[in-house]
Image (cartoon, grey):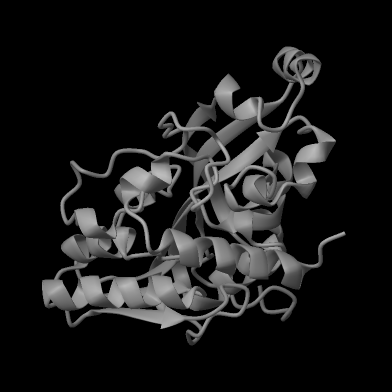
Amino acid sequence: MQTDNDLKSLVRERYSAIAEQSATQNASSCCGATSSCCGDEVYSIMADDYSQLKGYVPDADLGLGCGLPTAFAQIKEGDTVIDLGSGAGNDCFVARSIVGEKGKVIGIDFTEKMIEKARVNADKLGYNNVEFRQGDIEKMPVAGNTADVVVSNCVLNLVPNKPAVFKEIFRVLKPGAHFSISDIVLEGQLPEKWKAVAELYSGCVSGAIQQSDYLNHIQGAGFSKITIQKEKLITIPEEILKNYLSEKEIIEYKSGNVAIKSITVYAEKPAACCEPGSGCC
């Protein structure tokens, strides 16, 4: 049984390797790491196309997302935006194109190599209002009531303690502020053996939880106006399934009631509210 620290170490190791690769290389395997766990054919089974968004920087796009949260986040000029699991800076640079010179963007990632890559990209662009902080999003290196908007793209499924992250998002958002997060969720149960496969965890599959539980965690953290802004079904190609399931198990999986989905979720921190449990709400 892997502990939370074991899972965090796994993610840090995998994403340190990913930081050294291009988006094309990352798209070539379901786990996005250096191993060829998914065969030689190129798959891009989760990522959405950022290339048409203003502020897009190809060098910052590692092809690791499952949505376009910055496109749905209702970011305004002058806002302070926090990106959780900022990677090489992809969503940060898109957000910066909206907040402009008067705004600020903070990217948080706990992988040192990702932080290094993002800072190099920011330096190349000459941005002085985009910064990258190394830290755990379960305990963010950010003061409370800082952000107007929080975004994240396919990251929370990698975090063992998801309720803690939503509580932290609530803490760092200003009253009346909001988040838009893209993530992988489930309906139905994945094959039990997948839970022990490291590649499927770091590949954002086996760490995903039930959609109903995910939304309940958001509500439990104190958020209101919870809305699913976008939803899409993720279909895992049979070439990938063969790496983990027998032919019989593949048939059972396909005929079952399991849905792996990407959702983009919006929610607000109430405008006249303080921390849950404080008694003032």
The image quarter in which residue 185 lies: top right
User: Is residue 45 or residue 86 the one in the foreground?
Assistant: 45
The image quarter in which residue 242 lies: top right
* Residue 2 in view, yes or no: yes
Instruction: State the image coordinates of residue 270 (x, y, percent, origin top left).
Output: 53, 65
Eyeballing the image, is 57 above or below 254?
Answer: below
Check the image and name the residue furthest to the right. 1
Instruction: State the image coordinates of residue 210 (x, y, percent, origin top left).
Output: 72, 41
User: Is residue 115 or residue 231 the one in the foreground?
Assistant: 115
Q: Quadrant of the C terminus?
A: bottom right
Q: Quadrant of the N terminus?
A: bottom right
Eyeballing the image, is 49 above or below 103?
Answer: above
Instruction: State the image coordinates of residue 167 (x, y, percent, origin top left).
Output: 64, 70
Eyeballing the image, is 17 above or below 43?
Answer: below
The residue at 26%/61% (across/down) is 95
State how many labels appear.
0
**Would residue 33 be found to the left or right of residue 76 on screen?**
right
The residue at 34%/65% (across/down) is 88
Eyeballing the image, is 112 above or below 185?
Answer: below
* Residue 80 in view, yes or no: no
**Would residue 191 be found to the left or right of residue 183 on screen?**
right
**Would residue 116 be found to the left or right of residue 213 on screen?**
left
The residue at 76%/17% (across/down) is 256
The residue at 57%/70% (across/down) is 170
Instruction: State the image coordinates of residue 208 (x, y, percent, origin top left).
Output: 67, 46
